[in-house]
Image (cartoon, rainbow, N blue to C red):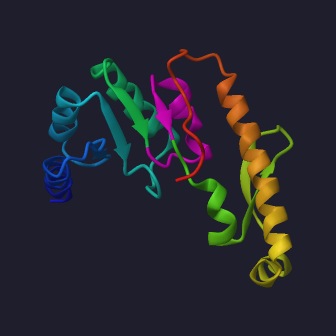
């Protein structure tokens, strides 16, 4: 039912002069993905966040989509830092994620681990409480997290992947 509503919303927006990128959600019938790929250059793939599926599942999904529809520009919605494997393996044009906002939403910070990979880490209870009232602390924690995400972006940009792949500006 949601796939039908998504397609109806697509048509309504187009009838009103807008040109939205169609979104196919993992788990919807693939006939909708096929329709979008035959009728639009850009396709966004959603429904990848918060699902209890493995990185291998997403890697295979992305590879299959990019092999069946090589002429489309595929954008992955909200894959997060941990979804980088799908970006590296498939011929994805762009990705986005909102990990940077997890500080405000969940009291986490973005840190570089011992292998210089970034990940989310939970702040101590004292620091989580401090986030509520100390605006300078909020700013400092956010800046440090964004620096770590920028380092992540540089890592992805320097990966040996096809030149047409890009990461869109971080922020969702």
Q: Is residue 83 magenta?
A: yes
Position of residue 164 relative to residue 59, above or below, is above
Give the residues in magenta: 77-95
Q: Nearer the viewer, residue 145 or 118?
A: 145
80 inside magenta stretch: yes
Which quadrant is the N terminus positioned in? bottom left
Residue at horizontal 38%, vertical 34%?
Answer: 61
Going 33% across and 28% down the picture, which residue do you hit?
Answer: 65
Residue 87 rendering spot, x and y as whole percentages:
53, 31
- Along the horizontal axis of the image, is 53 left or right of 103? left
Q: Position of residue 73 (x, y in %)?
A: 37, 27
Residue 130 in the image, given as x and y percentages of width and height: 82, 81
Q: Nearer the viewer, residue 47 or 114?
A: 47
In the image, taking residue 125 as reference, residue 62 lies left or right, namely left
Direction front: furthest residue: 17
Identified at 85% across, 71% down, the residue is 137
Q: In the image, 116: left or right of 42? A: right
The relative height of residue 165 versus residue 94 in the rendered view (above or below) is above
The residue positioned 49% from the left and 44% from the top of the image is 54
């Amino acid at each position: 039912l949601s796939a039908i509503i998504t397609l109806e919303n697509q048509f309504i927006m187009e009838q009103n002069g807008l040109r939205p990128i169609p979104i196919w959600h993992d788990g919807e019938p693939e006939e909708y993905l096929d329709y979008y790929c035959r009728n639009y250059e850009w396709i966004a793939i959603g429904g990848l966040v918060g699902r209890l599926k493995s990185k291998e599942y997403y890697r295979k999904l992305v590879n299959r989509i990019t092999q069946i529809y090589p002429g489309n520009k595929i954008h992955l919605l909200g894959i997060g830092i941990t979804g980088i494997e799908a970006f590296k393996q498939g011929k994805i044009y762009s990705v986005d994620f909102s990990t940077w906002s997890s500080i405000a939403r969940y009291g986490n910070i973005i840190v570089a681990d011992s292998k210089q990979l970034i990940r989310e880490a939970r702040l101590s209870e004292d620091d989580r409480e401090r986030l509520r009232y100390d605006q300078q602390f909020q700013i400092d924690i956010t800046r440090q997290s964004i620096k770590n995400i920028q380092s992540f972006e540089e890592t992805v940009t320097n990966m040996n992947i096809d030149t047409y792949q890009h990461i869109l500006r971080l922020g969702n």
